[in-house]
Image (cartoon, grey):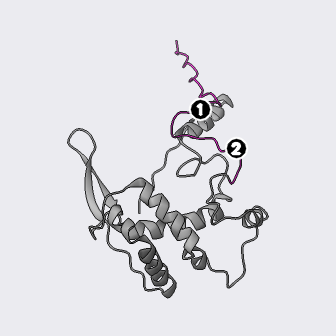
Amino acid sequence: MPQAHPRPASVPSGAQPAGDTQVPQPWAWVQAAIWTKRLLAALDNGVTGGRGDSRMDKVTAPRPLAAAWKRVAAHQGAAGVDGIRITRFQARATPYLAARARALRAGRYQPLPARRVHMPQGQGNTRPLGSSAGKDRIGQTAVQLVLEPIFARDFLPCTSGFRPGRGCKDALREVARWLQAGYTWVVDVDVEQ
């Protein structure tokens, strides 16, 4: 006699564990210093910019770089291959940010290689992790703050991976919704080139 599989417990829609958040407004997560209401309205309306539209001028403007610096400083990450810790960068943040903006605008900026660290991952295994230099993290974060809202608009509502204001509980709620709708197959594909 075949055994009936019990229906998995669904994740309550009101579940809010630490770290996971439900954003009630679609653009509540964007950096207000960069994305004004006018720019967000243009994004919502699908305005994409003209031929000469450049995002680099937005990345290298003082506000995005300052917002990126604030975010990187809050994480207190490890030093990269340059050996410069966040506290040392903080002592000269204004001239460092200005120099970064000039190098980015001029096309002279070259990121440093990531410092490779091997993190323990159970049973004697390790997982390689790359630690970028602080100045590179600031540039990367500024690019993220400018570009992320542009691309987030096009993502499907059911996607949760690496998206602001979403987490694993949101993905579990989506899985539970599909299970309740009667779907029983899951296909997991990992493509490697």
Give the CA distance from mark 1 to mark 2: 30 Å
User: Does the magenta stretch mainly form a helix, a strand or a loop?
Assistant: loop
Point out the frontmost of discs 1 and 2: 2
Q: Is residue 60 left or right of residue 54?
A: left
Which residue matches tag 2?
Answer: 24
Q: Residue at x 67, y 64 (%)?
A: 35
Q: Amino acid at mark 2?
A: Pro
Q: Is residue 107 left or right of residue 57?
A: left
Q: Residue at x 33, y 74 (%)?
A: 112
Which residue matches tag 1?
Answer: 184
Query: Residue 175 at what x, y percent from top left?
Result: 59, 36
Q: Residue at x 31, y 58 (%)?
A: 78
94 part of magenta stretch? no
Query: Who comes first in sequence, dot 1 or dot 2?
Result: 2
Q: Are marks 1 and 2 in contact (CB under 8 Å)?
A: no
Query: Residue 43 at what x, y percent from top left?
Result: 73, 64
Q: Residue at x 45, y 67 (%)?
A: 138
SS at mark 1? loop
Locate the C terminus and report the quarter of the image it occupies. Answer: bottom left
Start and end of the magenta stretch?
1-27
Query: Residue 107 at what x, y percent from top left?
Result: 47, 86
SS at mark 2? loop
Residue 94's image quarter? bottom left
Tell me if mark 2 has few (under 14), some (14-19) or many (20+) residues whose alpha carbon lies within 10 angstroms of its own.
Answer: few
Return the residue nearer the eye: 163 or 91. Answer: 91
Q: Is residue 5 left or right of residue 137?
A: right
Query: Residue 113 at what x, y percent from top left?
Result: 32, 71
Return the residue nearer the eye: 154 or 82. Answer: 82
Residue 93's image quarter? bottom left
Q: Which mark is residue 69?
A: none
